[in-house]
Amino acid sequence: MTPEDILKEPPRVLTQAQREHYFERGYVGVESLVPADTLAELIAVTNEFVDASRAETQAGREFDIGPGHSAERPVLRRLKRPDDQHDAYWRFASGLMADVAADLAGPDVVFHHSKLNFKWFDETDTVKWHQDIQFFPHTNYNVFTIGCYLADTDMSNGPLAVLPGSHNGPLYDQYGADGSWTGCLCDEDASVVDMAKADYLTGPAGSITVHNCRALHYSPSSKSAEPRPLLLNCFSSADAKAYTPHPDPSSHTYEVVRGKPAQWAWHDPRPCQIPPDWSGGYTSIFAAQAGEDA
């Protein structure tokens, strides 16, 4: 569906102005959207997983841990596939977040993946400028990620930042000079990003962020000693079909969460870079950008 057709559909959660903002700029932030009881459950479950990660000594299928991780000082960078790890995460993804997704994808919505990223007080936790769609190309670009802050987030603890309008700009090469996948812009390309135009999406716990798969985005390092968790759920319109192996599929990957399956795929003529063959597994964007996967 085109943005014009989607905007003709009655909104479920977002206002019409918020939907228009997303299509015009490639992202939107909504403060304090998540109900207090839902947020409290997500935070409690998340704290349980942080405690469970203390026993881990290396990154695996469930946890991505960073350098210096220990039982005394856990550095959990990512909980992988939270939709499979606890029912609270899946109820959230397939409930309120799926309704938000239908406001932007149209009535037929497919779940792609989820992840729970953390910011820790560490200068290495910066997420560099990148675009998402090169990780998982689809036949069109009606693919987006909805983030939910599980802690109050301001400039002190590494909010998501998006470059307005970049979803209508070029896609960048996310391989390094040696041909290895980095999952981010090279230094030369990143140096021309106008940082003055970056929009930092802050807000109290329970606020959401939405960014299109083509939108340039990054996250600065946290200056807070407290971890900043961001629960991310990625969706697509049902007529956007993936054509490369999924980086980290869960049991819910490609599940129709609103509406019905598409009988026709919509093909956007703009090209997309092909990522590595993920069928052998994938760690995380943190590992890729740090060169740990090389």
Image (cartoon, grey):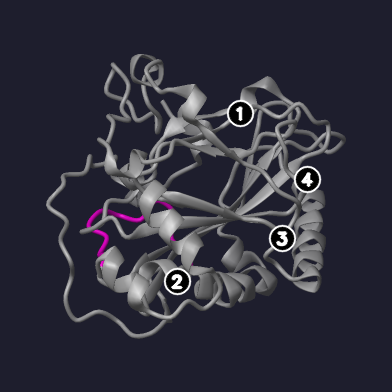
Lower sequence index among marks 1 and 4 = 4
Residue extending farthest to the left is: 269
User: Looking at the picture, how far across and down is residue 290, in whole percent?
Assistant: 51, 24
Q: Which residues are magenta?
A: 240-250
| Location of residue 264 with respect to 284 vertically, above or below | below
Q: Amino acid at mark 2?
A: Asp
Find disc 2 in the rendering and name its residue. Answer: 103
* Nearest the eye: 34 or 289: 34
* Left/right of residue 291 with respect to residue 260 in the rendered view: right
Taking the spot 17% from the left edge, 56% from the top edge, the residue there is 268
Q: Are marks 1 and 2 in contact (CB under 8 Å)?
A: no
| Magenta highlight on residue 246 | yes
Secondary structure, mark 1, is loop
| Magenta highlight on residue 192 | no
Q: CA distance from mark 1 to mark 4?
A: 28 Å
Q: Amino acid at mark 1?
A: Pro
**Disc nearest the viewer among 3 and 1:** 3
**Disc nearest the viewer among 3 and 4:** 3
Q: Amino acid at mark 3?
A: Ser
Find disc 3 in the rendering and name its residue. Answer: 32
Q: Are marks 3 and 2 in contact (CB under 8 Å)?
A: no
Q: Please identify the quarter of the rendering in which residue 182 is found.
A: top left
Q: CA distance from mark 3 to mark 1?
A: 22 Å
Checking the image for residue 55, the label placed there is 4
* Left/right of residue 126 with respect to residue 283 in the rendered view: right
